[in-house]
Image (cartoon, grey):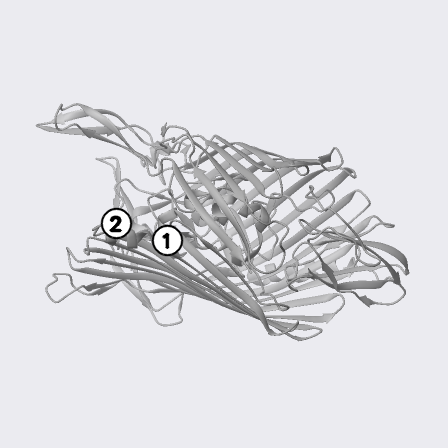
Amino acid sequence: MILQKRGYFTVFLLLIFSTVLAQDKYTLSGTISDDSSNETLIGASIYIKELQKGTTTNEYGFYSISLPAGTYTVQISYVSFGTREETVVLNSNIRKNVKLTSENKELEEVVISNNIKRAEIRKPEMSVNKLTVQEIKKMPVVMGEVDVLKSILTLPGVTNAGEGASGFNVRGGAADQNLILLDEATIFNSSHLFGFFSVFNADAIKDLKLYKGGIPARYGGRLSSVLDIYQKEGNSKDFHMTGGIGLISSRLLAEGPIVKDKASFLVGGRASYAHLFMKAAGEDNSAYFYDLNTKLSYKLGQNDNLYLSGYFGRDLLDISDSFNNVYGNAVVNLRWNHLFSEKLFSNASMIYSDYYYGLKLDFIGLDWDSGIKNYNFKYDLKHYLSDKFKLNYGLNAIYYDFNPGTINPSDATSDINPEQLEKKHAFEPALYIDAEQQLSEAITVSYGVRYSMFYRLGSQNVNLYTNNQAVTFNNDLKIYEEATPIGTKHYGSGDVISDFNNFEPRVGIAYKLNDDQSVKASYNRMAQYLHLITNTSSPTPLDVWAPSDNYLKPQTLDQYAVGYFRNFKDDTYTLETEVFYKKIKNKLDYIDGANLIANDAVEQVVLPGRARSYGLEVMLRKNTGKLTGWISYTLSRAEQQTEGRTAEETGINNGNWYRSGYDKTHNLSVTGNYELSPKWAFGAIFALQSGQAVTYPNGYYQYGDITIPSFGGRNEDRNPAYHHLDVSATYTPKPEKKQGWQGEWVFSIYNLYNRMNAASITFRQNQDTGNNEAVRLSIFGIIPSVTYNFKF
């Protein structure tokens, strides 16, 4: 069967190559970069006015377009920079590197005009949102810290898991279904201080793109979204420092040339220090974080570039010297860009990613470590075969080490016995090919396939169960219970315990109605072989990642989307609307009373189910004028179902569909920025979401002196609606100053009207009155802050 599928894959490759006909054309190629720093620009536009066609730069600033011989007017533009217009005589292959400037001025024989953001009409790319660092830095956020993850919550289809919760949910998907990449390396926990801050230092970020659907075949391993973030390369022309001093944390970033115009470095750090004030006030508790971003870039020659990037972050929580928690990410990526020809670009990456979690509980004498590591090799090629046909293809292979838990006594007096939960290993290779083809003046399509494989490896002792069922059903009590193993089977190091493979086709189409509007449709199939074992709706550092095996089957998704896109009033406004439908197989569901902490047999408390979500997304953006911003609204539904395996079994929630913990019927976000003058700028964000789906008790009964609650179906209730308004004001004393020390003050207020949003609601019996009562836990009220940002 596998050989047959591989045969289909080979035929698919041959069909694609056979569609490309040799043509007598020449190629214009090169790199687009920032004139002030030599930083390459991702997604810069290259447009040929006479032919009304163009292309964009890839993740490394490279572009290539093949055209008939002739003289052309070429427009090169990038958001927040401007548009350069040049004349090119194309009678041979030409390498043309272009530098853009963010200042609006006239250069010799070059015309520069303002460039604005507009909806992409021709490209079949959809369900994709991109935010520039300039946009992110204008947004008011909690405690004065610019937050990349909080910024994407302003986009349609994206919600948070609640006040102060980490992670984010996309189109009704779980947080573990998001693939988060930093310079191509996987980030397993994206939050500091349990969701108060993200791990991404905005000063070090160059580009951010969120894929919610229509995901290219080069990405895999997650179902709901891909958040692809690239760090800056470092200024290879001049030395600069950027930083900020806030009430809670500060940051500093340095970048500059090692060899001018050839090699550069970047190093940036952040740290919080609120715990120092807590200690000074006599508090025994403390919580703080720190992180470090680094990058080295070296231009080996005209066709080769080398990059070494890294990130290291840690969070520390200490409560009365009896509870100590340390967790964080460490990633390293060595990348080599090579240009084989003006039409063939390649990137090879060797990546290491490590997520560590440590917990020390002195009051019970427990010291616990866990984590996940992966070693990833990627090789991607982009082939610009003609002006109407582009091809992406490549491979990647990931080896995983899982440590569910190492338990040790914290001191000599502890009663804890040392224990190592069985470590797990897996290997995930994949091949992919992706094409973008213009079929006519009006129709452009993208199509491709990813072939992924997954091998669950030893060494490990695997439990065996009667009828291969790790969960049994007690027909008398009508409940699910943990099955008792009937034995174990040992697999040696490198032995294959189980294996899976999936074909993951992707297709998209754009039909251009005219130069200002188009309709698009997409379909993509995804497979996810890793599972986050958690019984909360948002990730916590205590959560454990587990690989697919004989009992935890891979999740698979099919997603369909249709959209309408329009620019109007001379690109002053853009409108993007989409409807989507997602269905997921093998979505894990937990039996009632599931124990997930330090569980070495997780298969005994989970059942496979299915999930679905569907909805409408609308985004209206104003691009020009003193007032800019966008309004996004999502109307959606997210549900899951776990039916009984036999007629006697009840399933979860009696086998009925129920709202998932990520269901938010309404999600509205309004983002605005107002440039009052060169010195003063103002920003505001209003967010409104339906409350989180939860299960409240629907009654109670007495057993002696004890009040025992009873519950109905899962997630039949909701927390109160979540909403808040954040505002900011930025004061730049000397906006005309472009050299030397440049500073600005950012004043912000999070939750302006002091809305006490419910992080959770618990029910208890009042000790004084004996009455039952609901208690709301709120984390944030109104939070004013001030930050001083500088660069020189």
The residue drawn where x is 17% and y is 58% is: 362
Between 26 and 274, the residue placed more toward the observer is 274
* Residue at which label 2 appears: 483
Name the residue type under label 2.
Answer: Ala
- Residue drawn at x 33%, y 51% is 274
Q: Mark 2: which secondary structure?
A: loop
Q: Residue 159, position in %: x, y? A: 47, 39
* Residue situated in front as seen by the camera: 621 or 764: 621
User: Could you classify mark 1 by the number of other residues whose Cα lies within 10 Å: few (under 14), some (14-19), or many (20 or more)?
Assistant: some
**From the viewer's perspective, is 278 left or right of 616?**
left
Q: Quadrant of the N terminus?
A: bottom right
| Above/below status of 265 relative to 158 | below
Viewer-proximal residue, 273 or 323? 273
Quadrant including the C terminus: bottom right
Please say if 596 is above or below 397: above
In the image, residue 286 sits, relative to residue 331, either above or below, namely: above
Cα–Cα gap, marks 2 and 1: 13 Å
Q: Which residue is mark 1?
A: 551
- Checking the image for residue 363, the label placed there is none
Q: Which callout, 2 or 1, points at the residue further toward the start of the chain? A: 2
Residue 542 x, y percent position in the rendering: 31, 53
Q: Position of residue 196 (x, y in %)?
A: 39, 47
**SS at mark 1?**
loop
